[in-house]
Image (tube, rainbow, N blue to C red):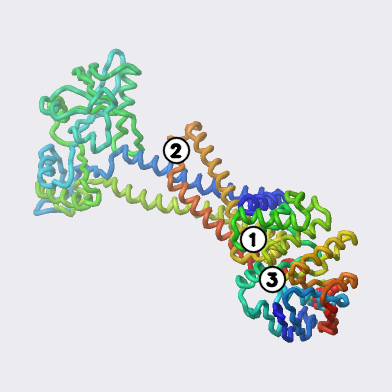
Amino acid sequence: MGSLSFFRQMLQDVRQQKLRTALTVLGITWGTVSVSLLVAFGEGLEARIRANQRGLGENIVIAWPSRTSLPWEGLGKGRRIRITEEDVEALRREIPQARFSGEMSRENSTFRRERVRITPEVSANSPIFAAMRNIIPAAGGRYVNDLDLDRRRRVVFLGDKLKQDLFGDQEAVGQTVMLDNVPFLVVGVMEKKAQDSSYSGRDEGKAFIPDATFRGLFSERYLENFIFQAHDASATPEVTRKVYEVLARRHKFDPADKEAIGMWDTSEAEKFFAIFFGTFRAFLAIIGSFTLVVGGIGVSNIMYVVVEERTREIGVKLAVGAKPAWIQRQFLAETLTLTAVGGVCGMLVTFGFLAVFPLLGLDEYVGTPQASPLVIATTTALLGVIGMVAGWFPARRASLLDPVVALKLA
Amino acid sequence: MDKLIELRDVRKVYSTGRLEVQALRGIDLEVGRNEYVAIVGPSGSGKSTLMNILGCLDTPSSGSYTLSGEAVAGLDRNRLAEIRNRHIGFVFQSFNLLPYATALENVELPLLFAGVSTKERRERAAAMLERVELGDRMEHKPTELSGGQMQRVAIARALVNRPTILLADEPTGNLDSASGKAIVSLFEELHAAGQTIVLITHDSGIAKLASRVVRVQDGQIVEDVRAAA
Ligand SMILES: Nc1ncnc2c1ncn2[C@@H]1O[C@H](COP(=O)(O)OP(=O)(O)OP(=O)(O)O)[C@@H](O)[C@H]1O
Ligand SMILES: [Mg+2]
């Protein structure tokens, strides 16, 4: 007897119940595909949105100097606050738990190369700006560095789209472009990145130059904005409070006056996404699980029929000395096998689909769904539980049959 | 005489809806080692009911049953399964072979539940099939066998775990007379070799061959005759 015969019995059942078994396995397959695809899409979408989020920078706070909204020490409200590089220096000194970069910008300077003229946004900032904003130079180039700043070099780092507009497919690094008739050396081009939120246009279309160069060239003192990033994301609220304190002291406004400096804490979005995606994933998993449970009910149902049809066989086994546990194991194993077959089919369909999906070119919108270990583990665990539950009741019923009743002797 | 079976005032009541059928009404029966008992009686008299109780396939409504010195009443399902496996070989009128399994696999079944190793199972089942002259049919499925052959497979299965008693409920009832005769002579051989046997039969010719004939009527033993040795 042994395993060989176990499978033979199963084949027998499958043969006698072709349609029913097929539908049942299909149910489990469908359930598996639903669960795994839903979770995979959820994860893909989340990864996509997080990548977009990273495009702006992780847990950075963007701050804009604005006007006071509260009177302070005899000064009226509505006073304009202007931030300079010295303020940023003071922040760096006084708040060591974070890094800071000021940014100046211009939107009416024209880039010219041969016959191409473009008026992009020019952003002037410091070398750490790139790290904070996840601006990564493509191979062969670099971002603006400290030496550029010290020497007020006329160098420019181009967003990938801007580079494409100016240079097409030609190499840009080492070339010269004219910015308002002043020659600038291209030192780097941005690696293409995903970015779906911005506060002054996407980085792909911008030109980045050293702020010292910018100040000299355009005689500009005041920063458009500055960004900061706590070394530990959880310290962001504390750092934010300190930023208000330092600037309020230097510019004489109420440290509670949130309108004097507008702030956008992107880590709040991060928190929102964490909650949103947690809920979203749970929602998808629940929907998928229901589908699987329905499949499981199908399996359970077919096993009841199988038990019914094999009552006599169960009686024979009991009559020659099978213990209830043995009978129960047999049916449980059979149910788990059916579930496993459905599960494997489902996984194969899912893998097939995931392999084909990137070819559809929808990645940019919904991300790339992936059969991550989480997806596989979730689905396998669910299938196991459903198989056990689906098999347990019919198996138990089989094992508790009375031998006389099962043999139809009584 | 060594008592293998001891029934004391065994009763069996079937209740179907409002109707109560007293299938057995106070059976006292002792069966000793190496007896060959034939149970006879009219249809509906309670023979099968008695046999199922003897085989631990069913439990009495009241009374006591001692098998090889062990009181059977109140034992749990697992212990009953062990008793069926170790002490009892049951032969049914309708063979009750597993249809998808070969003759050899059918005979191996009790050994599987007894926890015998695969190799030994094979050997003992094969030897038992040789014993019932089916050595050349081991790999056949029940549907590829005649009624007589199926019943011999069933007997081999009943005997393979060396049961204390062989029980048979009308083993020839579904067979033609020639096949029936072969089975009956097989029983005689087994008895001669020391096997304790209890069988139910309607055939007085078969009953005559037994060492003892118990007549059941209306759920009671009305006659118990031992053949002169
Ligand atoms: N499960 C049951 N429910 C109700 N009554 C039953 C049941 N099984 C048997 N009986 C009744 O018990 C009585 C004895 O039945 P049993 O099968 O033991 O008779 P038998 O002597 O074996 O008959 P036969 O020679 O026809 O096989 C009969 O009246 C029968 O109708
Ligand atoms: Mg009967």
Between disc 1 and disc 3, the foreground one is: 3
What SS does tag 3 mark?
loop
Q: Residue furthest front?
A: B229
How far across and down, in percent of the image, does residue A94 sit? Answer: 10, 47
* Residue A359 in sight in this render: yes
Residue pictured at 68% horizontal, 65% vertical: B162
Please indicate whether residue A299 sits to the left or right of residue A285 in the image: right
| Residue B23 on image: x %, y % | 79, 80
Q: Position of residue A10 (x, y in %)?
A: 66, 52
Mark 3: few/some/many CA within 10 Å (<14, 14-19, 20+): many
> Which quarter of the rendered image does ligand 1 occupy?
bottom right
The residue positioned 31% from the left and 19% from the top of the image is A166
Q: Which mark is residue B111?
A: 1
User: Mark 3 — residue?
Assistant: B164
> What kind of residue is marked 2?
Thr
Q: Are marks 2 and 3 on the same chain?
A: no
Tell me if B139 is positioned left or right of A105 in this view. Answer: right
How many labels, in total?
Answer: 3
For badge 3, the amino acid type reads Thr
Give whichever of A152, B221 is nearer the camera.
Answer: B221
Parent chain of label 2 = A
Type of amino acid at the residue the image marks with label 1: Leu
The chain containing the residue under callout 1 comes to B
Q: CA distance from mark 1 to mark 3?
A: 15 Å
Residue indicated by mark 2: A368
Dot 1 or dot 3: first in sequence order is 1
